[in-house]
Image (tube, rainbow, N blue to C red):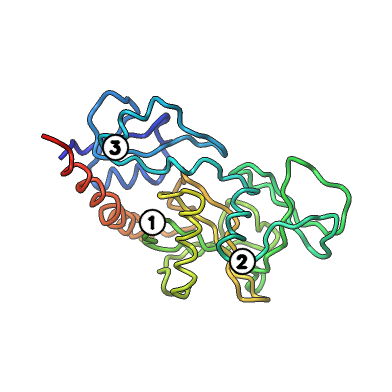
Amino acid sequence: MQEKRILFYPDTPHERAVILKILAGLGYGYSNILNSKYLLGFKWRDTTVYSLDDSITLVRNHFPFFNTRCTDISKRHIAAVFTEIFGEVLAINPATFSGAVVCKSNRNAAHDGLVTTAPTQEMDPEKVYQRLIDNADGDEVVDYRVPVMLDRMPLVYVKRRPISSRFSNKNASVTLTTPEALFTAEEQAKLLAYCRGIGMEYGEIDVLRDRSDGNLYVVDANNTPYGPPNGLTKEDSSRALDLLCVGFECTFLPVAKQANSALPE
């Protein structure tokens, strides 16, 4: 077995990244130096589109390396994958669609969504246009933030914000629950299939349920997430990290142990 160290490459995570809190809870170290020994690794760069170069090929032969296929988390790409997996339309053509739409940046983590009305001929090529998902509950909207680790969803954050600031990153409140409490078995399978479709083996997705049709819509994906989110109580933040630590140990570590046992002495 290799040392209790994790490789992040080409970058190391930001201090606010939840993965560092998970590793601290489990007693693991980390680095982005290639010529060292590691248990496993993650492709890590906080950007919308990024592919690894050939410098990682050699070390990938010595331990599992995750998220290498997650090269594009732009809104345009993930909406296309969502439609492929779920069969529902999220992206629209604002010149022909009629009704309320969301206009937002194609890049990740911009939090610049704006509700407007279609049809319109005023289109920004740097933006994406999606149907407005009605996830209102009274005077608030409800988002489900779902951490994903391979084939496991350890928990769900239920995030509430005022409708007037629905695209803000500041939450009015956040509570914890389980995937089973919110999603059917079929929906859980589709969420995991969606993550496989964008190549994301570790990360978090934003899921909305439209109250008009009852369907789920995946509107965002992040493969370098911060967390736990603001709005959680101190007790729930601690509980969330405990659940994430268990999830990490139950998913990534068995893969690493199996891979290391197969290496020649």
Report which quarter residue 265 is drawn in: top left
Instruction: Say whether residue 46 is left or right of residue 66.
Output: right
For the residue carrying disc 3, how many other residues have a C-alpha within 10 Å: few (<14), some (14-19), or many (20+)? many
Name which residue type carries label 2. Answer: Gly
Name the residue rendered at 87%, 54% in the picture: 120
List the residue tagged with mark 1. Answer: 237
Q: Residue 110, how many percent across, how many down?
A: 63, 43
Residue plotted at (43% across, 56% down) = 147
Across and down, in percent, residue 32 comes to: 35, 28
Circles 2, 3 touching at the beta carbon (< 8 Å):
no
Q: CA distance from mark 1 to mark 3?
A: 23 Å
- Tell me the CA gap for discs 2 and 1: 35 Å
Marks 2 and 1: which is nearer the front? Answer: 2
> Mark number for residue 87?
2
Q: Amino acid at mark 3?
A: Ile
Contact (Cβ within 8 Å) of mark 1 with mark 3: no
User: Mark 2 or mark 3, which has the lower sequence index?
Assistant: 3
